Amino acid sequence: MKLGAKENRFYVWGAGLFCLILLMLLTPTVPQSQDYHIFADRRNFFVPNTLNVISIFPFLIIGVIGFVLCLHGNYFGLSLRGEVWGWLSFYAGVEATAFGSAYYHLKPDDARLVLDRLPVTIAFISIMVIFIIERIDERTGTASLFPLLTLGIASIAYWRLFDDLRPYVLVQFIPFIAIPAMSILLPPKYTHSVYWLWSAGFFLLAEIAEATDKKLYKLTHYIISGHTLKHLSAAMVPILLTIMLSRRSIKIERAIWTLRPVIKELSKPSSKDSRVQGERRRFNDGKEEGFLMEWNIDMQVAT
């Protein structure tokens, strides 16, 4: 028996809940180490932890730019409403990261760390939702945005209340698995997908820089620390994604694959519309690209 979309979503959420319960039962609690708040560069130039604070500023700039361009006449040419919500959520998270992270680095502690991790989690989850919308299904991705954001916020609340990082680590781990898997297994809808790879590379550099905070600080003769470099490397992720959005276009092959059922339905011989009959012949002759281009122009005129 073939399962419907609702049943599939039910089983996916059920499997996720089962994994979370299994994790909580089989693993010990993971408290937040207080050594996490001790960074290599603690110099103060009129502002506590100056470089770690000001190096987060690029997030504010690119977050505002991306958010405005998503709303301003659809500059990025997002073809699905769910994509707009996903990217708006992403850029909102990027903007908020600038404020939350700067506030945290002024006086690092667990309470302020909440405001650092919360917007980063929102941005991570938004990216995963965008991948679902682009490469699997718009309805599924859009419907998962609010539940996944709620799950991310709940994982941070759980850590803060019970000093247990396990749910938070799981929420952060899922995108690391899901996004590469979707990138490999599912065809992209848009061109310029290489920007995703470059973004992943800079994110990896950011993680390495964070892990080698003190070593890099010493290696650079105490000029710049690994944590500061982490901020600058991580800021390249939204910058590259913004460039990607401004340059990319819909792939003809993927659009034809997506629209093929609709096109075939409209092109049935029973239709008495002469234009549809003509387009049917063009479609069957392998001229899908011309059909799609005219269809796209008509849609733009209609909207």
Image (cartoon, helix red, strand yellow):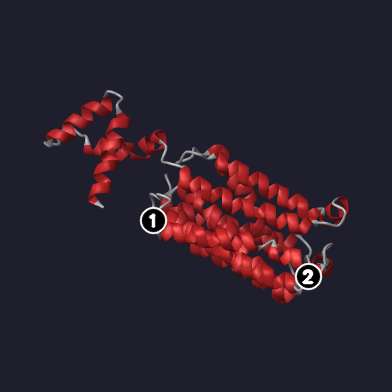
Rendering coords of residue 262 (x, y %)? 29, 40
Q: Residue at x 87, y 50 (%)?
A: 219
Q: Which mark is residue 45?
A: 2
Rendering coords of residue 169 (x, y %)? 70, 60
Q: Which mark is residue 81?
A: 1
Q: Residue at x 31, y 24 (%)?
A: 286
Quadrant in which residue 123 is drawn: bottom right
Tag in front: 2 or 1: 2
Residue closest to the eye, 286 or 208 = 208
Q: Residue at x 82, y 63 (%)?
A: 41
Rendering coords of residue 223 (x, y %)? 82, 56
For the residues labelled 2 and 1, the Cα–Cα distance comes to: 45 Å
Q: Earlier in the sequence, mark 2 or mark 1?
A: 2
Q: Residue at x 16, y 34 (%)?
A: 275
Q: How many marks?
A: 2
Query: What amino acid is at disc 2?
Result: Phe
Q: Quadrant of the N terminus?
A: top left
Question: Extreme front residue here?
Answer: 46
Residue closest to the eye, 109 or 245 = 245
